Amino acid sequence: VHVVQTVSWSPDGRAVRIVDQRRLPGEFAECELRTVRDVCDAIRTLAVRGAPAIGVAAAMGLAASLLPFAGEPVHRLRDRLREHAEAIRASRPTAVNLPRAIDRLLAAAEPAGDSAELLEALRREADAVRDEDRAMCERIGAHGAALIAHGARVLTHCNAGALATAGIGTALAPVYVAARAGRQVHVFAGETRPLLQGSRLTAWELTRAGIPVTVLADGAAAALLRTGTVDVVLVGADRIAANGDVANKIGTYALALASRHHGVPFYVAAPTSTLDPCTTAGDQIPIEHRPAGELLEPFGTANAAAFNPAFDVTPAALITGYITDRGLFVDPARLFASLTATSESLA
Amino acid sequence: VHVVQTVSWSPDGRAVRIVDQRRLPGEFAECELRTVRDVCDAIRTLAVRGAPAIGVAAAMGLAASLLPFAGEPVHRLRDRLREHAEAIRASRPTAVNLPRAIDRLLAAAEPAGDSAELLEALRREADAVRDEDRAMCERIGAHGAALIAHGARVLTHCNAGALATAGIGTALAPVYVAARAGRQVHVFAGETRPLLQGSRLTAWELTRAGIPVTVLADGAAAALLRTGTVDVVLVGADRIAANGDVANKIGTYALALASRHHGVPFYVAAPTSTLDPCTTAGDQIPIEHRPAGELLEPFGTANAAAFNPAFDVTPAALITGYITDRGLFVDPARLFASLTATSESLA
């Protein structure tokens, strides 16, 4: 099972190499980000996307962007570090992973006594951000793989796969781990209008990994569930409220309703970092509404309005369980208790 | 309320004028069908679509296609009639309206004694097919308009509007009748992947008629229903089984599930001709599966398969009522009883 590597160091170790997701699935191209401008452009234009992958690319990109200035005195390098950090931080407003990764690198650079130490500290911290992301994916995969029997048919939505992380993804991680263990898995991928991350990205990365995939229109998912050919539904999450309500890509809620109606288990797979104990319920999660053009182009002549929320909220009552890097939880209260539990008590 | 006229006679009365739906919504163009080849091409290439509109265009087109041969003896004209009739009948395989319309014209031509009588009989029968279709739409509109209060917000799917009939549509007929009566109506139109009849056609014809419309991705309908901003859901039907199960455009079933979950009434509007007493239940309705390319183009590189049924089946239990040209029915048994009832007993 060859899973695509979305973010890595270039062979010379002086640039971040990313899969250019603007060109998928028509063309598989990688590009190398060397300057702060390269990094900002890649994030802003969605060459790299998915909150975890953005965080890793930002951390590695920030470290790489300072390498050409290794000969400068450390106070000059610190000025550049702050300048680059704020530029990258501002390149996309949404997820929490990007500012968190930047803050980690800034903190790691604090104790450095000279330029070489500073660059080395940044590199070490960027590696740690990447390694933790990969480990997070692997743990989600390990915790979720028990749900994927030999011959399992899995329905997913949007792209919560390797292309959204530095590792094997979140919702797709259990699929990859099961496939690695030799189990046959068939994935049904909702195309995910309006931006088609399902047909463009999920179908591409699974096909590349040798895992068979069938694409469907989002409106066809209920009909598919009715045929009895889906064993389990696995989706990602953008934010999980304290009561277990989940904000995820638009279309997830409809999928949860249809899954419940047909008795198909519906699991949310997400890193612990998406748990938001400060938001008590899903209706408090602010939902981004995106431009009408995403839906109406090339049909602009109709002068129609558009209802185009990027996310919807699935109530906890429709969710069979939560697969995180800390385990598989059925009860939202236990899920949130895992935030403060020690790793021993979770073992 | 200016509703688009999808099928009509040309000013000289020697051709069928249709709205070219291949060019909507980018361009509003009409074309005139004079020859049997014009008619067949228009039907085959979806310049005219929607089972009722196809039936009317076929009837009027068949009558028009014989006009240039008025000088021929009647036995030659009968040969041409049969030849044209079979060519038009074969131009699209799906709905029952097309062969029914052709058979009506063939029967109407039987008693004609000479060429002038034959052409006149065809013209009269073609007019009757068109007039009955328009009257059917008006009756559906009248029976359904009571559901559309002033300020009503209606959610629909696909295009069951004026563009699919020779009149004011089926699912949209109650909206037009309510708007004519001066009531404000706002329509939410599911875009209807993969062929986008909602954003291309429904949004266009409503905007043209001055009725405000908001387009949404099919996956967003459940989230919209959850906001409480939809008063009633109105969809069309391709076939209604004897137990009241309804086959309609893919995505309808998901909409019915979400409507039930949120307590929003879900109505099916369709002509009596879609009632199929010989099919006992929805699971016996054959479902057309369409090419993967509709979903995957321009993403063919993924080598993914596609689940692409054209229709799904909504069980009667999820349907609040049926609006037909013979009335509004809650009980499928009463709906089917209307097939054999006299018009007096229905009054």
Image: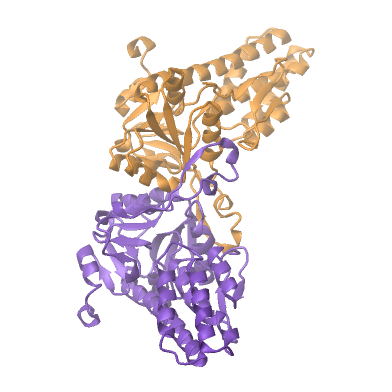
Chain colours: A orange, B purple
Q: Residue at x 51, y 72 (%)?
A: B209
Q: Which of the pair A156/A318 is nearer the observer?
A: A156
Q: Is residue A162 visible?
A: yes
Q: x, y (%) of residue B121?
A: 45, 88
Quarter of the figure with residue B274: bottom left
Q: x, y (%) of residue B29?
A: 62, 71
Q: x, y (%) of residue A342?
A: 37, 12
Extreme residue toward the front, this view? B75
Q: Residue at x 53, y 31 (%)?
A: A207
**Residue B34 drawn above or below residue A207:** below
Q: x, y (%) of residue A273?
A: 46, 25
Report whether A38 appears left or right of A94: right
Is the C terminus of chain B in the top left, top right, bottom left or bottom right quadrant? bottom left
Q: Which of the pair B117/A105 is nearer the observer?
A: B117
**Residue A329 drawn above or below residue B307:** above
Q: Residue at x 41, y 18 (%)?
A: A142
Q: Which of the pair A247/B118 is nearer the observer?
A: B118
Q: Residue at x 56, y 72 (%)?
A: B39
Q: Is residue B5 visible?
A: no
Quarter of the figure with residue A245: top left
Extreme residue toward the right, this view? A71
Report whether B337 appears left or right of B83: left
**Badge count:** 0
Quarter of the figure with residue A109: top right
Report whether B263 appears left or right of A138: left
Q: Which of the pair A333/B109 is nearer the observer?
A: B109
